[in-house]
Amino acid sequence: MARGTTDISELDQEKYDTDERVKIICLGDSAVGKSKLMERFLMDGYRPEQLSTYALTLYKYTTTVDGKAVLVDFWDTAGQERFQSMHPSYYYKAHACIMVFDVQRKITYKNLANWYKELREYRPEIPCIVVANKIDADMKVTQRNFNFAKKQGLPLYYVSAADGTNVVKLFKDAIKLAMSYKQNSNDFMDEVMRELENFELEQNEESSDKEDNVSKEEKTHLQ
Ligand SMILES: Nc1nc2c(ncn2[C@@H]2O[C@H](COP(=O)(O)OP(=O)(O)O)[C@@H](O)[C@H]2O)c(=O)[nH]1
Ligand SMILES: [Mg+2]
């Protein structure tokens, strides 16, 4: 699939503060099918924007929720997941998370616990969906219980990026969850971030006040 390029302004994350824009991140080990799921949902002709310097791919998608146009940015990893950890900016201002494992590789299921722990360090409250991918390879797995999701109280979707089973439902539900989180959130971390931003702003104002004073003093001295 052809990939476009994008400039750094794409990474200005303040845009996620506006009402009609949400950010949904994708987590999980390498080769569980994260990119394939995105591509399956968005279908042909879609051109993801590769930000190679930042090891991520952005997929933009427009839809309507309750009659309102919504812009969705899906964030996909592009290799950094190999290190079992993502940069904090990947999590920053995310409104929902799709966390994927491969039903054919047990280790990818085990590693969900690590991904979930890291997610909650940065985004303690956002909705998270657990995804059992590649069910086309073995339909029997849909009879199996994957306790991780139940234990954490998270929804679990059985999907196949290869044949499309449940893919549209997964993404539509993720968008709805992201929207409702954004509208109703009292996320403590959001509050803290806002406080910090205000604090930085005040500090900057203070220091520019000081500079003003200095230049005034200098001027009087000169006169
Ligand atoms: N059988 C099967 N293979 C899949 C499915 N989804 C992804 N794959 C394959 O798994 C490999 C890794 O997929 P990719 O999307 O690159 O994984 P990512 O590293 O998590 O983004 C590729 O060879 C895909 O073709 C699926 O639903 N069923
Ligand atoms: Mg990928």
Image: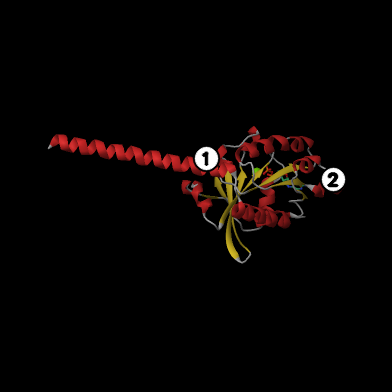
- Give the Cα distance between marks 1 and 2: 38 Å
The local secondary structure at tag 1 comes to: helix
- Residue underneath mark 1: 53
Residue 141: give its label: 2
The residue at 37%/40% (across/down) is: 204
- The amino acid beneath tag 2 is Val
Question: What is the number of callouts on the image?
Answer: 2
Q: Is residue 96 above or below residue 107?
A: below
Q: Give the camera-side residue of 81 and 99.
A: 99
The answer to which quarter of the image holds residue 118 is top right
The answer to which quarter of the image holds residue 168 is bottom right
Residue 54: x and y in percent read: 54, 40
Task: Tell whether 186 sits left or right of 211.
Answer: right
Residue 131: give its label: none
The residue at 25%/38% (across/down) is: 213
Circle nearer the viewer, 1 or 2: 2
Q: Residues within 10 Å of mark 2 (few under 14, many from 20)?
A: some
Residue 1: x and y in percent read: 62, 52
**Is disc 2's CB within 8 Å of ligand 1?**
no
Task: Tell whether 94 sits left or right of 101.
Answer: left
**Is disc 1's CB within 8 Å of ligand 2?**
no
The residue at 14%/35% (across/down) is: 222
The residue at 19%/35% (across/down) is: 218
> Which mark is first along the chain, 2 or 1?
1
The local secondary structure at tag 2 comes to: helix
Q: Which corner quadrant of the figure contains ligand 2?
A: top right
Residue 223: x and y in percent read: 12, 37
Which colouring convention does the figure follow?
secondary structure
Q: Is residue 85 above or below residue 167?
A: above
